[in-house]
Image: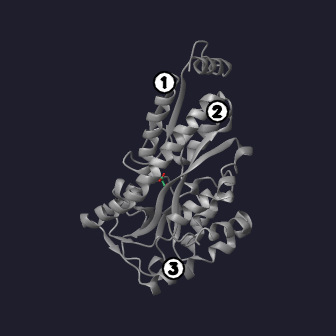
C-alpha cells in the first residue's frame, strides 16, 4: 500500500497537480436525485473507492445537475473539470452514433435482454466506441424501461398527435415522437418538471424512478405503461485522466466501480417496481395499461424509425441487440 501511495504521489506530480499532492480528486457529476439507482451507485462508488484507496482518493459526488447538466458534462470531462459521470446512453450522439441502438423503440423486450446485450461481445466492444474522442466507457448501469406520460391519456399513437414531448439529446428519440405526429423538444433533465408544470410541454418519456424521484407524476395526469424503450447509463471518464492513473490505482478504482454498478443494478430492478407502485398509490397520476392491440399500434407507428437509423448505427449492431431478446 505504501508503494501504491508513493506511486500515486508520483502520478500527481507528473500530472502537475501539486508538488506534494498525494490525493486524487474525483468529481462524479450526475443529474438525478440521490434516491435513484444512479444516485445510489455514485455514493457506493465513493464509499468503496475511498475504502480501497484510503487517503489516496477523494470522491465528491454532485447529484441533481448541481455541477453540470448532461449537455455540458462531457465537454467538462474533456477539459478535466470532472472525472466521472454516467449520462444516459441517449446523450452521446455527438461522440458516436452507435449508442443510438439503445434508443430504438421496441427493440429490447425487457431489462434482462438489455443486460444480455450489454454483456455480449458487441455490447462490451461498444464501451470503447469513443476512445478516439478522448472518452472511455467504464461500464453500463441500469435504470429501466421508459413509460410515456402526458396531460391526457395516451392509448394509441393518434393520442400523441400534435403534442409536445420533451426528449433527451437523441435524433432517434426525435424521430420516434415524429413518427406518432408529436413534436419533440430536446431539453435538459433539470428543466423537465417546470416544463410539465407550466404546460410548455404536454408529455415525456421516463423510467419509473425518474418519474417518482422528480415528482413528474404530480404534474402529468396520465402515465401509459408502454415499456417502449430503455433508459440506461454509460459510466464514462476521460482517457487522459484514466490512462494517467497508476495501474494499481486504476485496478482498485475499476473494482470499486464494478461493485458499485452491480449494487446500482440490483437497486434499479427493485426500485422500478416500488416507484411504479408508489406512483399508483399516490393517486396523483393515472397509470394506464395498454391492450395488446393498442400496444401493437405503437409498435407499428414507431418501428419504421429503425430503418432510418440502420445505416448510422450499423445493421450488425442492431441484429446483435435483437438477438439478446432470445
Ligand atoms: C438521467 O436519468 O440521468 C436523466 C435522463 C433524462 O435526461 O431524461
Q: Quadrant of the N terminus?
A: top right
Give the answer, above or below, for where 99 lies relative to 78.
below
Q: Earlier in the sequence, mark 1 or mark 2?
A: 1
Q: Is mark 2 within 8 Å of ligand 1?
A: no
Q: Foreground residue, 69 or 213?
A: 213
Q: Residue at x 68, y 33 (%)?
A: 243
Left or right of residue 159: residue 79: right
Q: Earlier in the sequence, mark 2 or mark 3?
A: 2
| Label at residue 107 | none
Q: Residue at x 60, y 29 (%)?
A: 249
Dividing the picture into quarters, in which one does residue 21 lie? Answer: top right
Q: Earlier in the sequence, mark 3 or mark 1?
A: 1
What x and y, as percent, mark residue 176?
A: 57, 71
Label 2 to label 3: alpha-carbon separation: 43 Å
Q: Residue at x 47, y 70 (%)?
A: 227
Left or right of residue 285: residue 321: right
Left or right of residue 175: residue 256: left
Give the answer, above or below, for where 273 lies relative to 22.
below
Q: Nearer the viewer, mark 2 or mark 3?
A: 2
| Label at residue 241 | 2
Q: Nearer the viewer, mark 1 or mark 2?
A: 1
Q: Classify 10 Å Cα crowding around label 1: few (below 14), some (14-19), many (20 and above).
A: few
What kind of element bears circle 3? helix
| Label at residue 298 | 3
What kind of element bears circle 2? helix
Question: Outermost residue toward the top?
Answer: 20
What kind of element bears circle 1? loop
Q: Classify 10 Å Cα crowding around label 3: few (below 14), some (14-19), many (20 and above).
A: many
The residue identified by callout 1 is: 54
Label 3 to label 1: alpha-carbon separation: 52 Å
Amino acid at each position: 500500500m505504501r508503494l501504491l501511495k508513493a506511486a500515486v504521489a508520483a502520478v500527481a506530480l507528473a500530472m502537475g497537480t501539486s508538488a506534494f499532492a498525494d490525493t486524487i480528486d474525483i468529481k462524479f457529476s450526475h443529474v438525478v436525485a440521490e434516491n435513484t439507482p444512479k444516485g445510489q451507485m455514485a455514493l457506493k462508488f465513493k464509499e468503496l473507492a475511498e475504502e480501497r484507496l484510503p487517503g489516496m482518493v477523494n470522491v465528491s459526488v454532485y447529484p441533481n445537475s448541481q455541477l453540470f447538466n448532461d449537455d455540458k458534462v462531457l465537454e467538462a470531462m474533456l477539459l478535466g473539470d470532472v472525472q466521472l459521470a454516467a449520462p444516459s446512453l441517449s446523450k452521446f450522439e455527438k461522440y458516436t452514433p452507435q449508442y443510438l441502438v439503445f434508443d430504438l423503440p421496441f427493440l429490447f423486450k425487457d431489462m434482462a435482454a438489455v443486460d444480455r446485450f450489454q454483456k455480449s461481445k458487441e455490447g462490451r466492444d461498444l464501451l470503447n466506441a469513443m476512445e478516439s474522442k478522448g472518452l472511455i466507457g467504464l461500464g453500463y448501469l441500469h435504470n429501466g424501461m421508459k413509460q410515456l406520460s402526458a396531460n391526457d391519456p395516451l392509448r394509441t399513437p393518434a393520442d400523441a398527435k400534435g403534442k409536445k414531448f420533451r426528449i433527451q439529446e437523441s435524433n432517434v428519440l426525435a424521430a420516434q415522437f415524429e413518427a406518432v405526429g408529436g413534436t419533440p423538444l430536446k431539453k435538459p433533465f433539470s428543466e423537465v418538471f417546470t416544463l410539465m408544470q407550466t404546460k410548455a410541454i404536454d408529455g415525456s418519456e421516463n423510467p419509473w424512478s425518474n418519474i417518482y424521484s422528480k415528482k413528474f407524476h404530480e404534474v402529468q395526469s396520465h402515465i401509459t405503461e408502454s415499456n417502449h424503450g430503455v433508459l440506461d447509463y454509460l459510466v464514462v471518464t476521460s482517457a487522459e485522466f484514466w490512462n494517467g492513473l497508476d495501474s494499481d490505482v486504476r485496478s482498485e478504482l475499476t473494482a470499486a466501480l464494478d461493485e458499485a454498478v452491480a449494487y446500482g443494478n440490483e437497486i434499479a430492478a427493485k426500485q422500478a417496481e416500488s416507484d411504479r407502485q408508489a406512483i399508483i398509490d399516490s393517486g396523483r397520476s393515472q397509470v394506464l395499461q395498454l391492450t395488446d392491440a393498442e400496444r401493437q399500434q405503437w409498435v407499428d407507428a414507431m418501428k419504421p424509425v429503425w430503418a432510418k437509423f440502420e445505416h448510422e448505427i450499423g445493421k450488425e449492431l442492431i441484429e446483435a441487440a435483437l438477438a439478446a431478446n432470445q
